[in-house]
Amino acid sequence: MHRTIAKFVLCIVLLTASNALAHFQVLMPSQDIVTPGGDRTIDFDIRFTHPMEWGPVMNMAKPSRFGVLANGRVTDLLPSLRPVRVDGHAAYTCRYTFKAPADYVFFINPAPYWEPAEKKLIIHYTKVVVDAFGAESGWDALTGQPVEIEPLVRPYGLWTNNLFRGIVRHNGKPVPHAEIEVEYYNDEQTVKAPGDAFVTQVIKADSQGVFSYAMPRQGWWGFAALVEGKPLPGPNGKPVDVELGGLIWVRVQDMK
């Protein structure tokens, strides 16, 4: 009897921990700075997961939009997406070759993801900036996504412990006191959180929608600003809650 109760309690604890994990849309380039004498081609890892805990990976339906903004021009990259399997789940990859100097803002609008544990749809509009050939201009250009983080700090060429700042925008307008979830891309699985509260950092923007965070470890960091969207039809056709996210990925390096 006691063993049955213990197993039941363990299942509840594991389920609760699983539900507490933050969802992050990953749009990860193989490099964020392309130098004139280096490789002009990068590859993207595109998956929906919990980056700090390095899983599980959730199935991704085909995104509604995938493109890049550079020199004021948007190029549709949706046809270049290639479906792959990651841990048995649907994900995507893409290869892109740079031809001219610019700051390239890659962005993706994923299909709504139904999260049964939270009984809501999740749509995280995600972007990442890659500097090509030392342009260092255009990194703050807005893609026009429904929810978007406007960087106030150039989102590449950063040292560990640099302060990253941004403005949370919803339909172009700043979002006062928006909540932002921050996670480390723990791809080498070398970071072990001492407790659940350390997995996802949570910060709030000020009255102007501005937030800041110092990234304490070398690697990629994801910033997901969350707002409530209008209800959409769920799996049974009835309206359900919608979580909209504006997400940006930023990489920092140790100073040596």
Image (tube, rainbow, N blue to C red):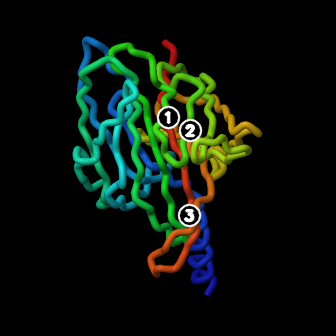
Residue under pointer 2 = 149
| Residue at the spot 23% in from the left edge and 44% down from the top edge | 80
- 45 vs 152: above or below: below
Q: Label for residue 122?
A: none
Q: Residue furthest right?
A: 207
Q: Position of residue 75 (x, y in %)?
A: 31, 37
Q: Is residue 130 visible?
A: no
- 58 vs 97: above or below: below
Badge 2 crowding class, 10 Å Cα cut-off, few under 14, some 14 to 19, many 20 or more, is many
> Marks 1 and 3: which is nearer the front?
1
Q: Earlier in the sequence, mark 1 or mark 3?
A: 1
Q: Are marks 1 and 2 in contact (CB under 8 Å)?
A: no
Badge 1 crowding class, 10 Å Cα cut-off, few under 14, some 14 to 19, many 20 or more, is some
User: Mark 1 falls on what kind of element?
Assistant: loop
Residue under pointer 1 = 142
**Quadrant assignment for the N terminus:** bottom right
Q: Nearer the viewer, residue 93 or 142?
A: 142
Q: Position of residue 65 (x, y in %)?
A: 36, 49
| Residue at the spot 24% in from the left edge and 37% down from the top edge | 95
| Residue at the spot 29% in from the left edge and 60% down from the top edge | 88
> Which of the 4 image quarters holds residue 37?
top left
Given the image, on which type of amino acid does mark 2 rest? Ile
Q: Nearer the viewer, residue 65 or 20?
A: 65
Give the alpha-carbon distance from disc 1 to disc 3, as whole Å: 23 Å
Q: Position of residue 121 (x, y in %)?
A: 51, 65
Relative horizontal placement of residue 5, taking residue 54 as reference (left or right)? right
Q: Position of residue 55 (x, y in %)?
A: 44, 54
Q: Is residue 249 visible?
A: yes
Given the image, on which type of amino acid does mark 1 rest? Leu
Relative horizontal placement of residue 202, taking residue 238 as reference (left or right)? right
Q: Label for residue 242?
A: 3
Q: Earlier in the sequence, mark 1 or mark 2?
A: 1
